[in-house]
Amino acid sequence: MDQQIKELIDNEINNNEVCLFMKGTPDAPQCGFSMAVSNILKILEVKFKGINVLENEQLRLGIKEYSEWPTIPQLYIKKEFVGGCDIVKEMYENGELNKVLEDKKIVFKK
Amino acid sequence: MAMNLKEIEKLIKESIPDALVEIQDLAGDGNHYSATISSSEFIGKSKIEQHKIVYASLKGKMGNELHALAIKTKEKDGSTN
């Protein structure tokens, strides 16, 4: 992976407690899976940064390599890769996501 | 580019021999699938690891030919679920 892209990803993950690599933006998602995760974070009133991978093809490819995960969206909480849409949705439904947010001391609406 | 349901099931079963695979074509367009996979290989692994095993079985097709495949993994050991 390009060193510059790796630094860009490291930088976003290190500087944002909750960041979502997604297609589109939280206000205008461009893929249903990205929208689903973004909406979950909105419902929980979690402050997060959405990073639009469609604006940068190198980033879109790079993030998949970075996490060894082939799909987007990808959610990171306090530098840890939590999962893509299926996992985040499942965790939201079974309460695990709340637990992770609590454990990592992220402010959210209970 | 689309992939057919049987092809997806075949790839998963080749890599995860004991897998029980249920696939649904969500939109009837050969492009949006949902798969539930149960296997004893998932026992003791995190969800991320479980999904990675499934992605690996699809040999790079996920995110390429296969755009929309929702995955749900279950541990098959009789005592859970």
Image: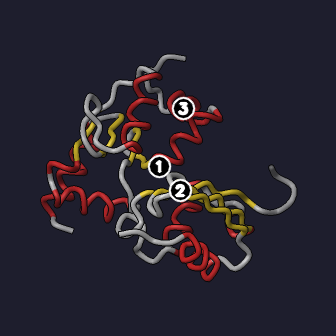
**Residue A21: which quarter of the image?**
top left
Q: Nearer the viewer, mark 2 or mark 3?
A: 2
> In the rendered structure, the residue with mark 1 lies on which chain?
A
Question: How many residues crowd mark 3 within 10 Å: few (<14), some (14–19), many (20+)?
Answer: few
The mark lying in front, picked from 3 and 1, is 1
Question: Quick one: quadrant of the N terminus of chain A?
Answer: bottom left
Label 3 secondary element: helix
Does residue B38 appear left or right of residue A48 in this picture? right
Residue placed under numbered mark 2 in the picture: B48
The residue at which mark 1 appears reads as: A83
Relative to A106, is A48 on the left or the right? left
Badge 1 and badge 2 both on one subunit: no
Whole-percent x, y for residue B80 in the image: 82, 52
Chain ID, mark 3: A
Q: Is residue B16 left or right of residue B27?
A: right
The answer to which quarter of the image holds residue B60 is bottom left
Q: CA distance from mark 1 to mark 2?
A: 6 Å
Mark 3 — residue? Answer: A103
Do labels 3 and 1 touch, CB within 8 Å?
Answer: no
Q: Are marks 2 and 3 on the same chain?
A: no
Disc 2: which chain? B
Q: Amino acid at mark 1?
A: Gly
Question: Residue at image x 72%, y 68%?
Answer: B20
Which element type, helix, strand or loop, lies under badge 1?
Answer: strand
**Mark 1 and mark 2 residues within 8 Å of each other at the beta carbon:** yes
Snapshot colouring: secondary structure
Residue in front for this viewpoint, B80 or A77: B80
